[in-house]
Image (tube, grey):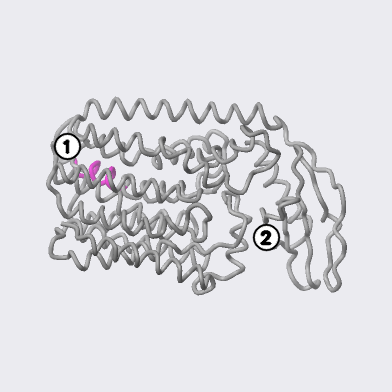
Amino acid sequence: MLEPWILLATFISSLAIGLLFIAWPALLTSQEHMERDLGARQATHTRPTPRVGGIGIVLAIILGCFYYSDQLESDLLFSLAAGLVVFWVGLREDIHRNVSPRARLLAAFVSAALAIALTRTVVPDLGLFPGILVQWIFPAIAITLLWSAGTCHALNLIDGLNGLSSIYTMSAAAGFFVIAGYTGDVDIQIVAGLLISAMLGFFVLNWPFGRIFLGDAGAYGIGHILAWLGIILIARNPSMAGMAILLLLFWPVCDTFFSIVRRRVTRKATDQPDRLHFHHLAVRALPLLKKRSRRGQFDNPVATILLVPFLCVPIFTGVVLWERPIAATFALAAYLVLFAIGYVGAMRYFTSHRCRKPGRFVPLSLSRKTEGRQNSPLSGTYTQDGENYDVLIFRDNPAVYWTLHAKAAGTGALILYGKFRNDVTAYEHFLRDAEGTSAA
């Protein structure tokens, strides 16, 4: 079983590697890339931050697995090793920013397919009709691929607030630890314990101040681990309730499912990020509830704490109902309905408390011209719904692209950054981003 000093070593390893990247953020990630992240549509942070925290977590888990290698069954070891494919692709995106969302999702499917090939393991059933999927191998493979790749992608999508993905991952891993204790799968308990310890080392750096982010490598890699802890558990224990395992994965998978539906309904690309996930709505709700004109410094970490019950209650339910497939199915359906009601209610709340139609941005003052720099006449201070934005569009010489800097007036927090071929394109990009935020 797990030894306390190994858990401590895993925690310290993850923490130390994270501190290394905080102390030298340009070790793997360029300053320009970190500044561009501030302008991403889904971004909620306000300062350049390295997003390679997943490296420390995964390396710490690998070290722990080496120590316990004689206690880990081959199916679990091979399934985890297959996740290195999607981890590597995610890491390339974190460092070079040149991997598309579709390529990352494809990598998640490749890792899933590799895990199936190495372990010869698929989801046998969900506990409702014992052995039914084994009779038709292709549906079983398809469900396993979707289960694995979908969980990877889902964990990446909920990684939007300080500490949110960390708390969810530790809670889900704790759920797997408890269920594996019931079934006697000691090796799954070991990996779940290592995951909790390594994630805790990252959590103390990520929450509340967000000194480092998980990144695509961390999100996809950890999503793969969680997915295969569940798949291996079900495959080894056909009598357990597969629906209960889905309850442990409920929050990220459900949020992703509603994101796909929302984007289909609004005819937007399903692979493009936005700021309409449930956690984005939660962080925006705090200024409205407190009747503030703009977001506060601690709204991000506070919103994470407010979401903890929503993350943990389905996990607790899955642990309680691990041997009761019918009850777990009804519980899963009930949580889906509650999630839908909560999301629709939140959207209606924003519609009634924000402007129904995006207001026209009116320039209040123009930026002064800096020596040696060409400022666009579109630069200035703009206002909408009582919120002011200092927008600077400039270029250092006619041979380079125009740079867009949009800051929250008063706080100076950078909310949008980018480089564009001309100043009009930069200005239109700022308007689209601001109007998209208002429409929420």
The residue shown at (41%, 25%) is: 337
Quadrant for the N terminus, please. Answer: bottom left
From the viewer's perspective, is residue 395 above or below residue 273? below
Q: Position of residue 229 (x, y in %)?
A: 25, 50
Classify mark 1: helix, strand or loop: loop
Answer with left or right where residue 328 lies relative to residue 251: left
Q: Disc 1 marks which residue?
A: 240
Answer with left or right where residue 387 lies relative to residue 364: left
Q: Which residues are magenta?
A: 136-145
Q: Position of residue 105 (x, y in %)?
A: 41, 53
Tell me which corner region of the image, top left, top right, bottom left or bottom right, holds residue 8: bottom left
Q: Nearer the viewer, residue 40 or 287?
A: 287
Q: Position of residue 59 (x, y in %)?
A: 33, 67
The residue shown at (58%, 65%) is: 33
Q: Position of residue 125 (x, y in %)?
A: 20, 37
Q: Disc 2 marks which residue?
A: 418
Q: Nearer the viewer, residue 174 or 331?
A: 174
Answer with left or right where residue 105 lies relative to residue 27: left
Type of amino acid at the residue the image marks with label 2: Gly
Tell me which corner region of the image, top left, top right, bottom left or bottom right, holds residue 46: bottom right
Circle 2 or circle 1, nearest the eye: 1
Residue 293 belongs to the span the image colors magenta: no
